Image (cartoon, rainbow, N blue to C red):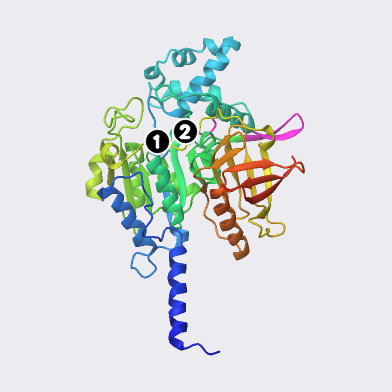
Amino acid sequence: MRVSSLVVVALLASFSAATAQAQPGSSPHVDPLPSWNETARKQAVIDFVNRVTDRDGDDYVPPAQRIAVFDNDGTLWPEAPLPFQVEFVFEELKRRAPQEPKLAADPMVQAALAGDVKKLLAGKHYDGLMRILALTHTGITTDEFNARVETWRKTTRHPRFQKAYTDLTYQPMQELLKYLRDNGFETFIVSGGGADFMRVWSEAVYGIPPQNVVGSTALTKFEFRDGKPVLIKTMDQAFVDDKDGKPVGIHQFIGRRPIACFGNSDGDQAMLEYTTIGNPLPSFGMLVHHTDAEREYAYDAHPPASGTLVTALAAAPANGWNVVDMKTDWKQIWETDKMESTQTFSEALVGNWLAEDIENHGVVDRAQTTLEIADDGSAAGNTSVNRYSGKAKISGDKIELGRLVMTRRAGPPALMDQETRFMKALEKVTRYRIGDNGLLYLLDAEGNEIVRLSKIED
């Protein structure tokens, strides 16, 4: 049967429109930044993303060059009353001092235990702080350090908000990270904090993999301990990734000039300048101004410990940098879907699982599509193309996989199709059961089995 050319054209047009609507970030009906108020700052972000992703526009930037860099302390999460890594150091000293008299006798350790931050920050190079960093960060293997950081983030609470430190991330910035990644950006942390410290949790908390974390570093040493190869942390040739060091770190570890930069202090000014001044590509700069003492903190020239915002704030108008007023630009501050790790569920659920079937359509042979549930309810895995992570809400046989953050790498069509099916299926999950055969079944609200997984043995 013949079909008229007009019908063919109409069908192609309908198909093209549907395809365009399916592209990440392209739907005009979905607010990508729902925690932002409808202010000029929100519109500036959206306008910039639209400009650089419009293939027909003069400002189009290919995905490979869409690099976005974010400061961490004060930009993605708080830095008050002290930067969170300093809080980690203090907790380490409190834990170790009772068992180590020599450590407890150190004057800088005593200052830290007494909360004398001014003494720790005295001197041109913050000599006291560098001393306690050396005592808590060196002479151990990278695995030992990672384990200590992981214990800290699971067991320690912020003194004001009484939540785990890694639960205190800014919801508007989490949305911004996702929005950029949905539109082909690769996101990086560029922070004065320790790279090793941030790499422990950056993927689970922000969806930023360890290799995309640029921070302060020092040399590690390779050696054998107990017959096994290990890396030992030192303070040799320390590189501080702050102020003028940030553009240097970007060049050394990223190798591309960013087109979008987000910070909150004078320590980020050089990074903003490097991103936006004389950049041959369209660029965007933004500062987060802490103005909300009720919901978070209010400071600029006189921060509680770090994060002075004076010269960068003065330079913002001339350089076209957007300044977020936290009090007026953000509807909410914190992520509300972070679950406390007090939930109880079957220990049999904890572990790494391999998808065997997705909504009765099978899976690609030898494709590693996985789901890992940790004992604190953290959820992570691999779609076979991208990594994802988030937090599961689990109670009894009920399970909900909340907002999952995912890397944005392309793969073969068959694997990308499986990724889409898998992630959409996880959104429907409300319950689970573990069969007598040891398989994990994820169920929807009607009790239908939508994903079947088998345990990956260690």
**Residue 158: percent from the left, percent from the top?**
44, 24
Disc number for residue 276: none
Report the amino acid beneath label 1: Trp
**Quadrant including the N terminus:** bottom right
- Residue found at x 46% / y 49%: 187
Q: Is residue 172 left or right of residue 375?
A: left
* 270 left or right of 382 in image: left
Is 106 rendered above or below residue 248?
above
* Residue 234 appears in the picture as rendered: no
Label 2 with label 1: CB-CB less than 8 Å: yes
Callout 2: SS = helix
Q: In which quarter of the view is residue 243 placed?
A: top left
Q: Residue at x 47, y 73 (%)?
A: 15
458 part of magenta stretch: no
Determine which residue is flagged by label 2: 167
Seen from the viewer's position, the closer of residues 243 and 67 is 67
As shown in the figure, which amino acid type bears the numbered disc 2?
Asp
Q: How many marks?
A: 2
Residue 314, horizontal then vertical, whole percent: 23, 40
For the magenta stretch, what is the residue range?
A: 221-238
* Residue neighbourhood size for the residue with mark 2, other residues' Cα within 10 Å, grouped as few (<14), some (14–19), many (≥20): many
Q: Nearer the viewer, residue 161 or 1?
A: 1
Percent across and percent down for residue 458 are: 74, 39
* Real-space Cα separation, disc 2 to disc 1, in angstroms: 8 Å
Chief secondary structure of the magenta span?
strand
Q: Which residue is mark 1?
A: 334
